[in-house]
Image: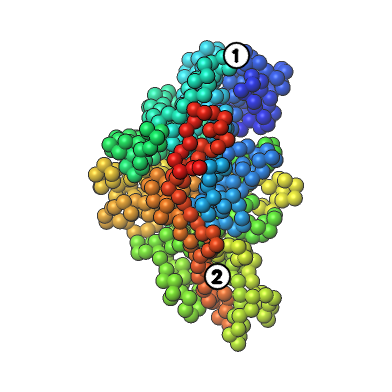
Amino acid sequence: MKKIIKYFPLVVGVIIFGSSCTKEEGVLNKKPLNILSSDVVWKDDALINAYLTECFAETYVFHNVSTDNSWSNLWTGSAGWAPMYIDQVSDECGTGYASDGYSYKMGQLKIQGGLLEWWENAYKVIRELNIFIENVPSSPLNANEKTELVAEARWLRAYNYFEMVERYGGVPLITHSQSLNDPKDSLYPKRSTEQSIYDFVISETDSIENQLPQTFSDVSRPNMYADLALKCRAALFAGSVAQYGTVQLNGIIGIDPSKAIYYYQQAYDAAQQIINGGQYTLYNKYPNDKVENFRELFTDKNGNPEVIFSVAHNNQNSMGNTGNGWAYDFFQCPLPNGWGSGNMDAPYLETAEWFEHVDGTSGKLDTNAIQQGLWTTNSLWANKDPRFYATIYTQNTPWKGGILDYHHGLITSDGSIITQGSYNGVLANGNQNWQNGTGFGVLKYLDENHNEAEGASSGQWASSSTNWIVFRYAEALLNYAEAAFYLGKTNDALGAINQIRQRAGIAPLTSINEGAIRQERKVELAFEGFRYWDLRRWRVAVDTLSVNRSGLTYILDYNTGKYKLQVIHNIDGTVTPPAFYSQNYYLPITLARTAADPNLVENPGYK
């Protein structure tokens, strides 16, 4: 659904709105324009649709952020660099410059919270949706439209609860609009069990599956397949928690291990419905250019057959909640950009090594060997999985008609190395962020047609028009493979993984195991906001995220044009190295929330 611009404070019974388009254009013809009672809202088709549209717009967590794009929330909304935090707290990348994501990566997730929160704004949206679900059935809309809109609202409510349960475990489950006259226990409900929240999400998706249309021309509205995609993801996560987690606090966190197979079956069945439905497929518009094909998957907004549900953007700046763009290109792009920064996510050398060669052999480098002699970037990165070139940029990556230059240091004709100035007209340093970076940046989702310097001084930088994909067909295949493997259906798992590898342009697997499934998932979904949650649900984050990783320095040789390579060890720092603690498998409820509500129990390990 397209975003209604401005502010929409539904919980206080008034609606203030600005401009809209398409179905909501009727809103502009209503009088008065600024204040409307709830009685008016539930009698008006355009206002009812506008109400639900804004609920979608207020679900900021689609972008893995916690707030809107007001100036006071500059660094916590999608108009800032907050969407990249989810990458930086994982093992995918460091950061080109200090951020909150960096501090939490270093073990600073404490009882005060602050990382990837989705609580207050989640319950605000849930309250608005509960009001909507209760009032639309008595509205004058036709029966089919009422059924469809209520189903969309229930889907969005279920999605919000999924985002909460993956963060906190069990949370208070509120499915009706509360009143100040309600009993205290109703106003301050206790946390439900983690299992009951997952069960609620799955049950809701089952209930509304046939109430949603199979198709929508607008991929920002959930159809039946978006419903199945949510069920599939939630059930897979629940299965992992049951298999690998520990039940604590009488089930407020953790799920009975005996339920794992049940949840994997639910995930498998939902994925199979998506696959058998035939409506979606892997994007393959450029089959003869695998690199271009994978890049275009994330920027092609015209009938993309892989996108099941996405958040739509346009090129109108959203800083200050004025438009519907976002700041992805501005902060993620190579230099130059408006603030002379860019390269917000700085992938590790180890992340580059995740990508195999096209023949299926490991992409891991011999870090001792590559530091001997001189190398071309072609010889260093030759024959890699095409997704590597479409996901990560580094030295000599083509960009806007030129190439990126990360070199730091110049070997002169006498063999000495200079790191400042120039030698015979050749600069000692390239034009990219070698000072704080790793030698790599994230290319996925970047639009080369976007002017990343636009609006830097006027606050107009949040104008990326690329949509953000929330559910896509490749994830359904990966979920299917993982669930199938744990159900003993190894042929199904192998077939799904090989579909993805074939599209990518690399050799198929001849056998399947857990490691191969996780390998394919981390490569295919890199920098899409999955990795951190995957490591948590598999309960491997303590070992995987408490590790210092590496970067790469390219030193240009003046005589040959080749590069001497230096591996930068411990690039995250040795004074405070990365640390993920066992309590971090759940976010803290926080001191502030438990102090305000004595019925809320804090998660274990936070003091």
Q: Residue at x 44, y 36 (%)?
A: 169
Q: Residue at x 55, y 70 (%)?
A: 553
Q: Nearer the viewer, residue 340 or 506?
A: 340
- Find the residue positioned furthest to the bottom: 414
Q: Amino acid at mark 1?
A: Lys
Q: Give the percent coordinates (x, y) of residue 141.
A: 54, 15
289 horizontally vs 508: left or right: right
Residue 445 appears anywhere in the view: no
Q: Do the residues under discs 2 and 1 have CB atoms within 8 angstroms? A: no
Residue 327 appears anywhere in the view: yes
381 horizontally vs 247: left or right: right
Q: Give the percent coordinates (x, y) of residue 534.
A: 42, 47
Q: Give the percent coordinates (x, y) of residue 317.
A: 68, 42
Q: Amino acid at mark 2?
A: Thr
First in sequence: mark 2 vs mark 1: 1
Q: Nearer the viewer, residue 239 or 217?
A: 239
Q: Give the percent coordinates (x, y) of residue 487.
A: 26, 42
Q: Which residue is mark 2?
A: 553
Q: Nearer the viewer, residue 96 or 290?
A: 96
Coloring scheme used: rainbow
Instruction: Compute the Cα span from label 2 to label 1.
Output: 64 Å
Q: Which mark is residue 150?
A: none
**What element does badge 1 sit on?**
loop
**What element does badge 2 sit on?**
strand
Q: Quadrant of residue 483?
A: top left
Q: Residue at x 38, y 47 (%)?
A: 539
**How many C-alpha atoms fall within 10 Å of the one at disc 1: few (<14), some, or many (≥20)?**
some
Q: Which residue is mark 1?
A: 43
